[in-house]
Image (cartoon, rainbow, N blue to C red):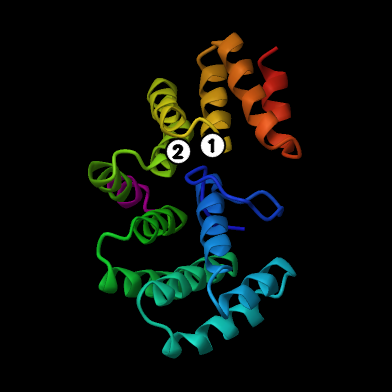
Amino acid sequence: IIVALGGLVSCASVEREAPASATVEASSMESIETASETNVLTDAAELYRSGNTAAAIGLVSRSLEDLSGEDRVSALLLLANLYMTEGDGAAARNRLNQILEQDSGHIEARFLLAMLARSDGDVQKSQALLQEIISIYPNYAPAYVAIGEQLLAEREYSEAKESFARAVEIDAVNYFALAGLGNALIFLKEYEPAVEQLTAAIELRPNQAYAYSDRARAY
């Protein structure tokens, strides 16, 4: 799954194959869980969980004209995430921009646009959007996780450690922040604290294999 949110927000996630971007996975799962509480979107969320993403997209799209206010925003956000799971970045971006037309400060829409830029290979734009997010919302943990992921990819381990540590400071039960911090610490050869962070991540998501293999590298 290319999407869907991020260590960003704590949420009841749907167990699926590991996403290309950890942070996006959490974000999209959060929006799906939120959307499932809103009228017709309950059925769409269930369709998604059963693997019928196309049907979920159709159902939500048909409901848009009957929705307004926050319900419409929730529907648009769910649609964006669903399109991202289908690899349709252009359709996802269109829905996210519709959200921002209604609410220019919508943090999840801004974040997912940053993730779309990264998936398009425009890392500079993605990082700039993420920095813009934390300048406005300094306690938005997913943005720090996403920044940390990119810094890890660039082998900027000390800076990545700082970004993940900030995310953990904000959200101490953020799996992706803990796992990312553990990885950064391994690269910095700080093995004892790395084990500590990865163990905390494993306790949050004991079915995730990645943290186990990463922790084994620290011993």
Quadrant of the rendered image containing residue 199: top right
Element class at badge 1: loop
Residue at horizontal 23 percent and vertical 42 percent from the top: 135
Residue 62, percent from left and from top: 52, 89
Q: Residues under labels 2 and 1: Cα distance?
A: 9 Å
Residue at horizontal 40 percent and vertical 20 percent from the top: 158
Residue 124 is covered by the magenta coloring: yes
Residue 154 is covered by the magenta coloring: no
Quadrant of the rendered image containing residue 53: bottom right
Residue at horizontal 51 percent and vertical 69 percent from the top: 78
Q: Which mark is residue 145?
A: 2
The kind of residue tagged 1 is Asn
Please tell me whether residue 11 is drawn above or below residue 218 in the rendered image: below
Please tell me whether residue 49 is drawn above or below residue 59 in the rendered image: above
- Which span is picked out in magenta? 122-128
Relative side of 23 to 140, left or right: right
The answer to the question of whether label 2 and label 1 lie on touching residues, with beta carbons closer than 8 A, is: yes
Quadrant of the rendered image containing residue 127: top left
- Counting the numbered discs, the total is 2
Can you identify the residue that label 1 sits on?
174
Residue 140, percent from left and from top: 37, 43
The C terminus, quarter of image: top right
